[in-house]
Every structure is written in C-alpha cells, then in structure tokens.
C-alpha cells in the first residue's frame, strides 16, 4: 500500500523506510482527526496539557498510517503494544517514531531500530542539558565555538537517544553512561548496534539520528 500523499519518504541507503510528516503543513489533518486511535490512546493523550496531547496524538495518527501502508492494513486495525520498557511495538515489523515540534519521523525496519529527531535549541538551553551527556562528550562540546555548541549538543543527544531506543531501554538508562561522541561519525558503545546520522530530507534547524540493533 502506498504511503499517505501528505507524507514524505526520505531517501536513504540504510535498510529502513523513513517517513516524515509535517503536522503544521500538509499533514495538519493528523492534529484534527484522531479517528484511527484507540480509546486507550485517546485517554493516554489526555494526561498531557492541551498542546502536548495534540502533538502526541498526531504522532500516533501518523505512525498508524505509516504502519498501515507497510502492512497493508486499516490504520485503525493496527495493534500497537508496549513492551516491558514501555516502547511501542508491533509483532510483524520493527519501528521507531520521534516527534520534534510538529514534525513526526517514523522508521520501519527488519531489525530493532531507534530514531530521534530534535530541533536545535538556543545555546543557553543546550548548556542547561549538557550535564546529561558522557564526560568525554561534554569535553568535546566545550571545545566547539559558541555558534556551533547547540547543534553539536543536539547531534550527540539525537545519537544517544536513537542508541537507547535501539536497546529498548530509552531514557530509563542514564544517557551519560555511554560514549557516542560529538565527532563527524558516531561511535557505538555496543558491538551489535550501528548508529548513523540522518541528513537527507531532514528540515533545516533539526538534527536526526538512527540506530539498528542487529
């Protein structure tokens, strides 16, 4: 089944299908029409404040449509379960979803996969969060110019979160335990996990990374 015409399939040589949806533009309908969600999903969204609830729901709507195209199913009929770490799963494929502001990025793959997309913040925001990273990554970031610091921080954070999602731990595992690095190529702390930066098709002002647990 073809993907929704309001979604964009990103070009990649990696063994994954990457779908980007902008819910502030062509895919704005995902913020208004939650008819494909389950009652449990709607109730879960209500635990957030109004804007966060709509953002979460829109991401789940996009995810259901992406999985429906991949599996040739009705989006409302897709059964998404949570594993012991709280990661959403489907029994017939591996996937990961990430939201940044009104962007939703979904990866569907054969191997367990972790994905993250982040907006580059102001430098002061990055400075407040840098203590969460590995000490060697902090040292590498401190060597960057003020102009490059925020983007450098987000690149490390996206790599780290993608890695932790691929491990199925998410942020239940301390992101400062593992060194992935701020250099041009991510270092994987685990022999079975490959980490890659994503660039093609990622909107300006955002940074994304993906990891595969083979």
Image (cartoon, grey):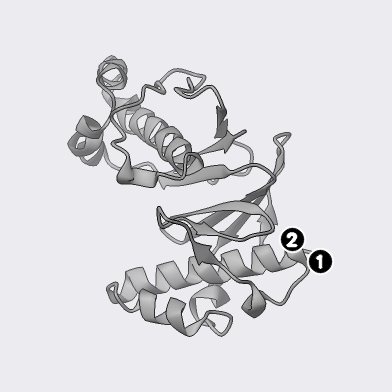
Measured from the top left, where is residue 189 in percent x and y? 44, 22
Picture quadrant where residue 43 is located: bottom left
Instruction: Using the image as rendered, state which of residue 47 and residue 191 is in the foreground.
Output: 191
Q: Is residue 61 left or right of residue 49?
A: right
Q: Position of residue 188 (x, y in %)?
A: 49, 23
Circle on res. 85: none
Residue position for label 2: 70
The label shown at residue 1 is 1
Residue at 37% x, 21% y: name it: 179
> Is residue 190 in sight in this rendering?
yes
* 75 with respect to 101 (left or right): right
Using the image, determine if residue 8 lies above or below residue 187.
Answer: below
Image quadrant in which you'd find residue 41: bottom left
In the foreground, 143 or 196: 196
- The residue lying at 44 percent from left, 17 percent from top is 183
Query: Percent position (x, y) of residue 152?
Result: 37, 28
Q: Secondary structure at mark 1?
A: loop
Instruction: Using the numbered discs, state the Cα–Cα distance from disc 1 to disc 2 in whole angstroms.
Output: 7 Å
Left or right? Give the position of 78 relative to 84: right
Indicate the quadrant containing the N terminus: top left, top right, bottom left or bottom right: bottom right
Please tell me how crowded label 2 is: few (under 14), some (14-19), or many (20+) other residues with Cα within 10 Å: some
- The reply to whether dot 1 and dot 2 touch (C-beta < 8 Å) is yes
Residue 150, horizontal then vertical, whole percent: 32, 33
Q: Secondary structure at mark 2?
A: helix
């Amino acid at each position: 089944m073809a993907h929704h015409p309001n979604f964009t399939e990103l070009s990649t040589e990696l063994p994954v299908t990457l779908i980007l949806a902008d819910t502030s533009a062509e895919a704005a309908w995902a913020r208004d029409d939650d008819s494909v969600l389950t009652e449990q999903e709607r109730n879960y969204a209500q635990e957030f404040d109004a804007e966060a609830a709509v953002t979460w729901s829109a991401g789940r709507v996009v995810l259901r449509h992406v999985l429906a195209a991949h599996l040739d199913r009705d989006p409302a009929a897709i059964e998404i379960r949570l594993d012991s770490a709280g990661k959403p799963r489907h029994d017939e494929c591996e996937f990961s979803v990430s939201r940044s502001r009104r962007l939703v990025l979904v990866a569907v793959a054969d191997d367990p996969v972790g994905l993250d997309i982040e907006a580059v913040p102001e430098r002061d925001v990055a400075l407040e969060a840098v203590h969460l990273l590995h000490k060697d990554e902090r040292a590498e970031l401190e060597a960057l110019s003020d102009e490059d610091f925020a983007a450098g921080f987000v690149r490390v954070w996206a790599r780290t979160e993608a890695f932790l999602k691929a491990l199925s731990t998410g942020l239940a595992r301390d992101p400062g335990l593992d060194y992935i690095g701020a250099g041009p190529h991510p270092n994987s702390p685990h022999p079975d996990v490959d980490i890659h930066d994503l660039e093609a098709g990622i909107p300006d002002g955002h940074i994304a990374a993906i990891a595969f647990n083979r």
